[in-house]
């Protein structure tokens, strides 16, 4: 990247993602043999994100249906 580059670059730090989920970072051993985060496991994050989106979609659908039921019951009560 040079001084004339106006592109905004964003990203993640492997250590931060490792704190969220240890599967989000590729690890290598340090000089003591401890595994330390080296890079981001983008594929693992993608799969995790898709699964979470599916869960959230189901939750939204459930809550939408519950809300419709409550509104219908409220309408019946108000019209009595």
Image: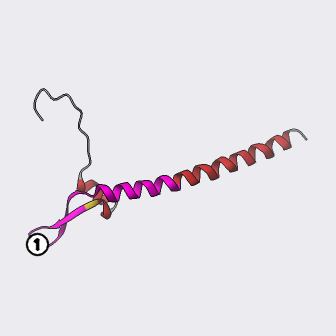
Q: Position of residue 41 (x, y in %)?
A: 27, 58
Q: Where is residue 56 in the image (x, y as percent from the top left)?
A: 52, 52
Marker count (numbered):
1
Q: Residue 64 vs residue 20: left or right?
A: right
Q: Residue 50: percent from the left, percent from the top?
A: 44, 54
Query: Is residue 64 left or right of 41 when viewed as pictured?
Result: right
The range drawn in magenta is 26-55
Q: What element carries label 1?
A: loop
Viewer-side residue, 78 vs 49? 49
Hey, which residue is sitting farthest right in the picture? 80
Left or right of 73? Residue 68 is: left
- Residue at 21 percent across and 64 percent down: it is 27
Color theme of the render: secondary structure
Q: Which quarter shows the N terminus?
A: top left
Residue 21 picture location, percent across and down: 34, 61
* Magenta run includes residue 54: yes
């Amino acid at each position: 990247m040079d001084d004339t580059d106006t592109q905004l670059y964003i990203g993640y730090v492997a250590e931060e993602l490792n704190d969220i989920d240890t599967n989000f970072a590729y690890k290598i051993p340090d000089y003591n043999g401890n595994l330390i985060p080296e890079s981001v496991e983008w594929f693992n994050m993608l799969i995790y994100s898709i699964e979470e989106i599916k869960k959230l979609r189901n939750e939204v659908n459930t809550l939408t249906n519950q809300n419709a039921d409550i509104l219908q019951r409220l309408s019946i009560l108000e019209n009595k």
